[in-house]
Image: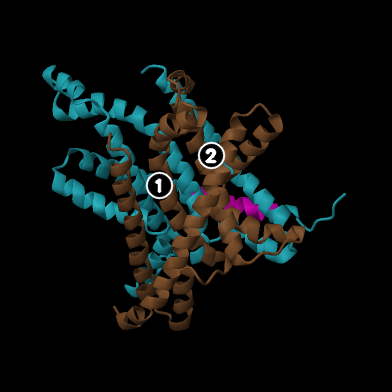
Amino acid sequence: MIETDFSTTDLLFMLKGAGMTLTLTFWAMLGGTLLGLILGVLRAVSPWWINAALGAVLDVFRSIPLLIQFILANSIKSIIGLQVSAFEVACVMLALYTSAYCTEIVRAGVLAVPATTRRAGRSLGLTYWQDMRHIVFPIALRVSLPSWTGLTLGVLKDTSLVLWIGIVELLRASQVIVTRIQEPLLVLAICGLIYFLISFPISRLGAYLETRWREYD
Amino acid sequence: MGYTFHWHQALEALPAMLAGALVTVETALLSMVIGVACGIGLALARNSDNRLARGFATTWVETARNTPALFQIYMTYFGLGSLGIFIDSYPALLIGISFNNAGYLAETFRGGLRAVPPTQMRAARSLGMSAPQAFRLVVLPQLLRTVFHPLTNQMVWAILMTSLGVVVGLNTDLTGVTQELNVRTFRTFEFFAMAAVIYYAITKIVTLSARLVAARLFRY
């Protein structure tokens, strides 16, 4: 039997970290999806100059490393003297980052609805919002959901970067234990396994939805 | 607001930061080259009949895609230490990113290979082309067309991922240099804002030049 100093307390500590990872992912996806829905629809229907301006702003979030975004957000917080915790900064920053990607997903979904389908709906007497709700939304949802699950996976993995601004999530928790018991390979393997166990079902679900919905195309 | 901005310090450090940016771009390019090479190998292995090769490739791809890039870097930096292999932060970063790139690119290449039907090859051979000719003139252009866009995306990802080197103590790439300046002067916002602008410029140059190259390559 191989000797190890890894105890159940350590495992619990890591699971707590995994809980933090999931909490961050939840808030980031909630905020990011809501904002992304609004901005995505806005980008799909607005005139070109609003569209271009919005696109350029959101592009910034996708062109700068998330790590630097966290550092900047944290220092802006200190500069303007906001009394918020690192956790809240991380949630807001992650949500903004997520919304930049979600906007593109929603926009692509809305634009995938053929104009003729929408015109047909309007000709049958649907109002603009009825057309949006009963025709655009269901079709756009089918197009976007696979990408959205992919985004969820991406954000789940990107939450690991918050360790830099002092939040103990799964990866940071593992590092703490590694520093104490000096068995990096074992601890990191467990950490990787936990990440895998969380994200693998999500990626399977995404693949399932994609193939299943393609049948009706 | 009791904070005075000191931009001149950041501007003075610009040459050092640009030197760091060069390291960032070099690292990203190198990791892409390794990633493409390993990615093609993995894509072929996943399509092969050898179960061992398939299992190995699948494990690699699933690990690369389902764990954070930072975890993969930690694994090479701290994890290999358990096996008695101690490596510096730079190789750890390079290996980590290349591993990640290979995992994602393997899927890209697999899709690309599937997109060119085998009948094309047969048709080209029937017209009297030799096998290398058919591959170069018929298969490759089509393959390139499908993988070009994902490849540029991955390049941008690679550039952004190099910033993770700072977490394992790298101090030569753009983020590393910036962090070094930051701990020396505590002008966090100014330095990192500058770094952000440089990263933005690099990714924009990469995407724009990729678009130009694509316009030339895929003009038909």
Task: Identify the residue under disc 1.
Answer: B153
Amino acid type at circle 1 is Asn
Inspect this view and state whether residue B140 appears: yes
Distance CA(mark 1)–CA(mark 2): 14 Å
From the image, state the color of chain A: cyan
Image location (x, y in percent) of residue A183: 74, 59
The magenta-colored residue range is A11-23
- Comparing A102 with B8, the one in front is B8
Q: Are marks 1 and 2 on the same chain?
A: yes
Q: Residues within 10 Å of mark 1 (few under 14, many from 20)?
A: some
Image location (x, y in percent) of residue A84: 40, 65
Q: Residue at x 73, y 52 (%)?
A: A8
Q: Which residue is drawn at 59% across and 56% down?
A: B95
Task: Identify the residue under disc 2.
Answer: B106
- The image quadrant that residue B96 belongs to is bottom right
Left or right: residue B196 versus residue A167 is left
From the image, state the color of chain B: brown
